Image (cartoon, rainbow, N blue to C red):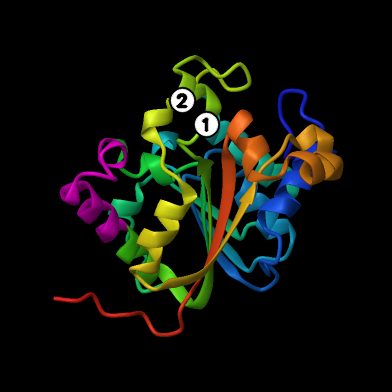
Amino acid sequence: MLAENGERAANVRFYCDYLFDEIPLRGKTMLDVGAGDGRYSFYAACLGAQRVIGLEPEVEGSRTGMHERFERARSLLGPQTVDLEPTRLQDYDPRGETFDVLLLHDSVNHLDEAACVRLRDDPTAREIYRVLFEKLARLSSPNGRLVVTDCSNENLFARLGVKNPVAPTIEWHKHQRPELWAEMLADVGFRGPRIRWTSFNRLRSLGQALLGNRLAAYCLTSHFCLTMRRSSELEARPG
């Protein structure tokens, strides 16, 4: 039911299990930033999450069928604990609610693409992301978990200046290294970064054992999964 367009359900399940490895979901609340059609929101609900909010600004007025896929999944899976809001993180009003799990699946660079491109060299761009990450910290429960996935801009094909045959549409300059994200998230109170490198889902455990490392990722899609935990006391911003 979570698989689309010929995907094998076992491959989707393998990836979801990988994504939330060591992340408890039963009885928890989750905010899915850039939720798309709600695939990972529904997975969390099926594993016992108490309440899931998905933020997806493209749902409103979208012609991609995203909202229809969300409603179809909800009708099939049944969990009424999942809601989809057509808004950006910047505009989201939690009305005092905090979340045990925050997920940004391939969306961290889309929070502000223009700023993301300039992040390493432009203090103004870093301040834009600091404000966004401070909001994430406020949305997190004490000791809440954060999961961030994206592609690193460190990639063999990007270095060579040619299209990646595995992922030819990736615009590498619009991405950043997981270490940079971890450093910036640490500045707002997230701790204990764990960086993993993603392999091909269809290869499952074998693929992860052989290709789930930095070197293989550098030669493939450079896709990573970063998990962190919010410190129990949110650190005050200096100055």
Closer to the camera, 39 or 193?
A: 193
Closer to the camera, 101 or 96?
A: 101
Residue 22 drawn at (x, y percent):
70, 66
Is residue 225 left or right of 22 when viewed as pictured? left
Q: Which residue is rendered at x = 51% and y = 42% of the image?
A: 150
Q: Number of labelled discs?
A: 2
Question: Which part of the image, by quadrant, shows the N terminus?
Answer: top right
Residue 198 drawn at (x, y percent):
66, 42
Q: Magenta stretch?
A: 114-132
Is residue 235 left or right of 204 when viewed as pictured? left
Q: Would you say the magenta stretch is mainly helix, strand or loop?
A: helix
* Residue that protrudes farthest toward the left in the picture: 239
Image quarter for residue 189? bottom left
Amino acid type, callout 1: Asn
Q: Which residue is rendered at x = 54% and y = 27% of the image?
A: 156
Question: Which part of the image, by quadrant, shows the C terminus?
Answer: bottom left
Q: Which residue is rendered at x = 46% and y = 54% of the image?
A: 179
Q: Is residue 145 above or below residue 182?
A: below
- Residue 51, magenta (yes or no): no
Circle 2: element type: helix
Report the residue marked by disc 1: 155
- Residue 116, magenta (yes or no): yes
Image quarter for residue 65? top right
Image quarter for residue 130? bottom left
**Mark 1 and mark 2 residues within 8 Å of each other at the beta carbon:** yes
Report the residue marked by disc 2: 159
Residue 79 visible? The answer is: no
Q: Which residue is rendered at x = 72% and y = 23% of the image?
A: 5
Residue 44 drawn at (x, y percent):
67, 58
Q: Is residue 195 above or below residue 106?
A: below
